[in-house]
Every structure is written in C-alpha cells, then in structure tokens.
Amino acid sequence: IKFSPEGETVILGAILHCRKNSTYGQRGSAYPYLRLYVEDHGKGIDQESYEKIFEPFQQAAIQTERLYGGTGLGLSITKKLVNALGAKIMVKSEVGKYAKFIVDFPLESMMTENGEFISLDNT
C-alpha cells in the first residue's frame, strides 16, 4: 500500500473457496480455504524479485529503499507468520501497473469428519 500513488485505489478482499487436488490435505479431496488479498496500483514488482522480497532486509530494488524507506523486513515477517499459521503467501504483479499479495489459509482443520464446519459459537 505504501507504494500506491496518493489517490489511487487499493483493493482488499476475502474469498471462501473449495479446492481439489492440492498440497493441503489428501490428494483428490476437496477442502475449503480462505483467501485474503491486497492489491495496490503502483510501481509493481518484476517477476525476478518475487522470492527476494520475502527475504529479510531485501527490497525489489535499491531505488525503493531510497524513495520509500523501510528496512525490508515487512514481507519477511509476514511470510513467517503466514507459514506458522499453516498458510501460503503468493505475489502476482505487473511492473508499472499493480502488485497483488495473496494469502491462502486452509480451513480443513475446522471441519468435522462429515465435512461440516466446527461451530465456534459457545452460546
């Protein structure tokens, strides 16, 4: 969001999906997951930098640090937290147009054996 020009649109979203044949759960089984995403319309990130930006003290380009500041720790910490929760983080981007960060949280641990969601309501 800090790379979006003032007055530009930033999109935040949450979608509940059901996916088959994934690395989560058993192959061939369907499982639900929650997808959260944030998309800003700014400078974007080149594909060669996708892995680098998740490393500590790294930014996509040296000009980024000079222009926007920061230590390069935000995405590194975010990835560690996301992974600790059993989720995955991904990035999609087009240079000069947008960057979209996507986090998928598997929800199968919140389901009963017959495929119903566990109620978190204690009332």
Image: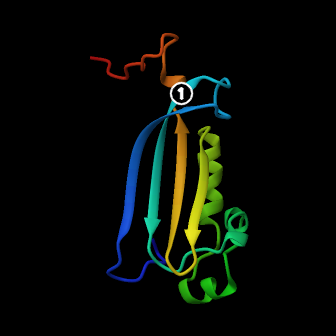
Front-most of residues 81 and 95: 95
- Residue 74 lies, with reference to residue 121, above or below; the image says below
> Residue at 54% of width from left, 44% of height from top?
104
Q: Position of residue 113 (x, y in %)?
A: 52, 11
> Residue at 73% of width from left, 67% of height from top?
52
Q: Label 1: how many residues lie within 10 Å, few (<14), some (14-19) or many (20+)?
A: many
- Indicate the colouring scheme: rainbow
**Residue lying furthest left:** 123
Q: Position of residue 35 (x, y in %)?
A: 48, 45
Badge count = 1
> Residue at 48% of width from left, 10% of height from top?
114
Q: Secondary structure at mark 1?
A: strand
> Residue at 66% of width from left, 23% of height from top?
26
Residue 63 shown left or right of residue 42 in the figure: right
Amino acid residing under circle 1 = Tyr
- Residue 116 lies, with reference to residue 70, above or below; the image says above
Picture quarter containing residue 90?
A: bottom right
Picture quarter with the C terminus: top left
**Residue lying furthest top:** 114
Q: Which residue is mark 1?
A: 31
Picture quarter with the N terminus: bottom left
The answer to whether one can see residue 93 in this image is: yes
- Residue 106 lies, with reference to residue 4, above or below; the image says above
Q: Position of residue 48 (x, y in %)?
A: 73, 71
Picture quarter containing residue 44?
A: bottom right
The answer to whether one can see residue 57 in this image is: no
